[in-house]
Amino acid sequence: MSTAVKDIPSQFEVMDQSLESQMTLSMGPQHPSTHGVLRLDLRLDGELVIKAIPDIGYLHTGMEKLFEYKKYQQGIVITDRMDYLNPLGNNLAYVMAAEKLLGIEIPERAQVIRVLMCELQRIASHMVWFGTSCLDMGAMTPFWFTFKEREKILNIIESASGGRMTPSYFRIGGLMMDLPAGFENRVKQFLEGFPDALKTFDTLITGNTIWHSRTKGIGIISKEDAIDWGLTGPSLRGSGVSLDIRRANPYTGYETYDFEVPVEPDGDVWSRFMVRMRELRESHKIVQQALERLKPGPIKADAPKVVLPDRDDMRKHMDSLIHHFLIVAEGFNVPPGEVYLPIEASKGELGVYMKSNGGPKPDRVHFRGPSFVNLSALPVMSEGEMIADVVAIIGSLDIVLGEIDR
Amino acid sequence: MSEILHEYVEKLKAENAEWVSDVKDALGEVTITVPAGSIADASRFLRNRLEFDLLADICGCDRGPEEDPRFEVNYHLFSTIHHNRLRLKVLLPEDSPNVSTVTHIWRTADWHERETFDLFGVKFEGHPDLRRILLPSDFDGHALRKDYPLRGYEPYSMN
């Protein structure tokens, strides 16, 4: 007994010595599994992570400064470049903030198309997350399957907006243009094939025992910690908090759609993985419902001083021509005020703070990026884990550096 | 929606009237202007008693060099329980843009405060690690201030 008591301090001494010889490893910014240009300052004891300090800013492009020098409608193209995996979500948050300041009502068809496109984009974004997080952990095959599905969605988005990664499809007061002919069939075709793809993913990964042992019990964050660290979206729902902005503060008519909010209780990499996998099915359901609701109608709000007129109108009506000229040359004035508009982007709460002082350019635009906040909780999840698990945890947070650095 | 929010404002006033210097209700959002000295106390009350458990965002704002007070710091509060939102606003003068930190109330405030410090030069007293986050540590000036030119003072080099 007495020897055992003596043994304990000596074990601690051994640990202390190894702590003194701890090593600092700079992971990134050119590391393939850091999803861009994230650098992690890792303090290691062997393979054990003692401390993880994220270092960001390598992709900072001063977007928030740029907004102040651009007219409201010019800001939309900047938002595409933030979370480049979910550009339509960024467009939506930005235009909705401006619409709230202007007090514009959006017609039904435009609302439905917005929901439809955003959910397709959410699936595309989750496809990249799924493919790359598997790739990070050495599973290369799923990547090809997920990018095949993503390609189909990007083709659909391209057919409507002309852009694959940078659609800028939503405009203040409605949409850029109406959907092209044959759009509904394309979406239907995708929806028919998608359940089979989900089955493939499940066969490849969800039931895979190697995957289970790499993800279960790794990177745990408790419910209280998750809220305290401001996690939102799938990362928060993976810790057992049922919070979805589409349900909590509904926008563009999400309250009328029938879908579930998936929640998993454990707070580990596996839970966050399962939440996203189940979300894919819910998004699939929402797209189906939106497609059924698609009825002919106007796609732009009745606000001639804000919304660009149709080309046809400009040829026939003098006032349309004048409005077009004024909107393009001078922009439109937005009433003074400030709004904070949150939406549920694919990674969590994307909030836009927009302040106007009455002119054609915003006084301040600030984006609360979900990746930015989720990444700040990385040290809590990764300290005490193995270095190989840090890669798994970053993958499970689904970060995009374009949005973190702005 | 806003009636419930006004109830919170009344509760906050009842706890300590000095915490609330102005209340604005516009576009369905309630903004409470809080004196810079009481932001931590008011935040603690809002978090612990009124269940605003998630700090969604902190963002700075520069009203322009000619304005006094020049800087704003906006705190966007959210409750995961009753799903309400509230904005706290702190006004800070140009010569001493100092406000106490709320990192001990919501830990997520850490990076938000660093960002606001980085881009506006607002100092959060008591912050455990207040250094630049987006811009390099040797960067000169605070880029989101209105008097900072869009293209900077001179081309930045990484030397």
Image (cartoon, rainbow, N blue to C red):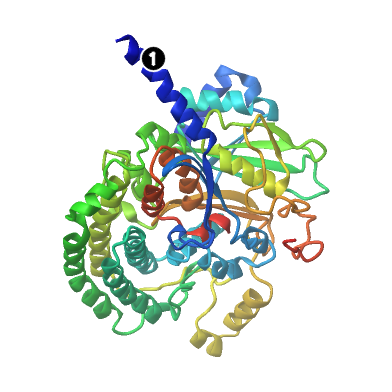
Q: Is residue B7 in view?
A: no
10 Å neighbourhood of mark 1: few (<14), some, or many (≥20)?
few
Rendered position, A11 above or below A265: above
Q: Is residue A205 left or right of residue B91?
A: left
* Left or right of A76, for residue B80: left
Q: Which one is nearer the viewer's eye here, B135 or B4?
A: B135
Residue A56: x percent and y percent?
57, 53
Residue at 63% in and 28% down: B39
Residue at 28 percent of width and 48 percent of height: A215
Quickly name the residue at label 1.
Answer: A6
Q: Is residue A72 in sight in this rendering?
A: yes
Q: In front here: A141 or A79? A: A141
A195 to B17, vertically: above or below: below
Residue placed most toward the observer, A215 or A176: A215
Q: Where is residue B31 shown, x and y percent of the image?
A: 58, 38
Chain letter of disc 1 in the image: A
